[in-house]
Amino acid sequence: MTGLIEVIREGAVAQLRLNRPKQLNALNSELAAQLIEAAERFDRDQSVGCLVVTGSERAFAAGADIAEMSDKPAAYMAERDYFAEWSRFANLRLPKIAAVQGYALGGGCELMMMCDFAIAGEGAKFGQPEIKLGVIAGIGGTQRMTRLIGRSRSMDMHLTGRMMDAAEALSAGLVARVVSDDKVISTAMEAAQQVASYSRPAVRMAREAVRRAEEGSLVEGLLFERRSFHSLFGTPGQIEGMSAFLEGRPPKFHQGEQ
Ligand code: HXC
């Protein structure tokens, strides 16, 4: 499968655009592989000074691909270490700016938070709705969101699965700037050109120093989160939550059968 990522190069900035618009850019393994491979290529390219990661008008990304993972057993998820490869993306040295229009949900919100900061459109919507599927975040959501917006707000998002609009995301500190939807890409590209225009070692050090402020025991937190996510596969809640989504009906969770 090719073409799940579109690459647009403008001077010292590379824009990586998720290109599965009909599925609201749901992150399947192939899309993840293509995005990470492209980002790693630019990370090694001395002529690139900043990345912009974006999606389409309706969705930055509506999460991990539910159809791809819905029938997987826990042993498969843990053995394959499902989505562990995203750590490679998060750890790139190149600065990454997320340009968000539409939905940034589940893995989509987590992808945004793996970037160094986000510029969102007024109509953007954010959330960690995994709880509604009988699972939890698995690409850093519980860890990164808590560091970004604090435990109370993060708990609200992870336990209720509700969405946040752009104004709330800005006031909570989940995104750095909100602009009109039609200015999201140009604003992010301008910011990226500015970052790319500075001394590369200074940019790297500023980025690493800021990251250091929040990354205390993140590695353990991420592994803990991923293992918890894996272990939910095959539970009645996961089977019901994902089947209900794929069948287009509301889920019925039976307490006491978990
Ligand atoms: C697979 C998805 C999808 C997803 C949307 N689609 N999100 N497919 N995985 N995460 C597909 C739909 O099935 C549909 O396909 C098409 O995209 C359009 O979506 P609709 O639901 O028809 O659009 P709309 O009614 O506008 O609702 C938009 C939405 C809703 C609110 C964003 O799609 C939604 O709730 N999506 C799921 C969000 C979610 O739960 N994300 C968390 C995933 S778990 P068809 O073929 O019918 O047109 C996760 C875990 C991360 O991210 C950890 C991994 C390790």
Image (cartoon, rainbow, N blue to C red):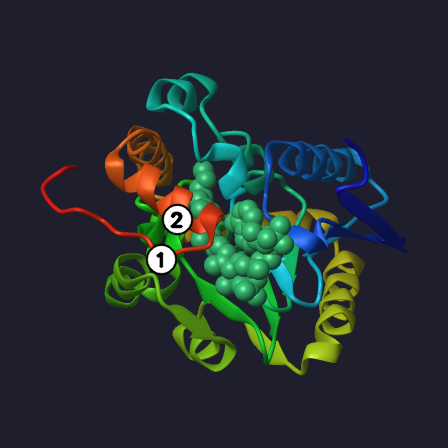
Tell me the number on the disc at residue 250: 1
Q: CA distance from mark 1 to mark 2?
A: 6 Å
Quarter of the picture containing the C terminus is top left
Q: What's the mark number on residue 86?
A: none
Q: Quadrant of residue 238?
A: top left
* 30 in relation to 140, above or below: above
Picture quadrant where residue 93 is located: top right
Q: Position of residue 157 (x, y in %)?
A: 33, 63
Where is mark 2, residue-wise? 244
Q: Amino acid type of disc 2?
A: Ala
Residue at 77 percent of width and 31 percent of height: 1
Q: Residue at x 63, y 37 (%)?
A: 32
Which residue is drawn at the image coordinates 40% and 52% (left, top)? Answer: 144
- 23 above or below 117? above
Q: Are marks 1 and 2 in contact (CB under 8 Å)?
A: yes
Quick one: SS at disc 2? helix
Horizontal and vertical percent position of residue 15 = 78, 54
Q: Is residue 219 visible?
A: yes
Residue 77, percent from left and from top:
41, 24
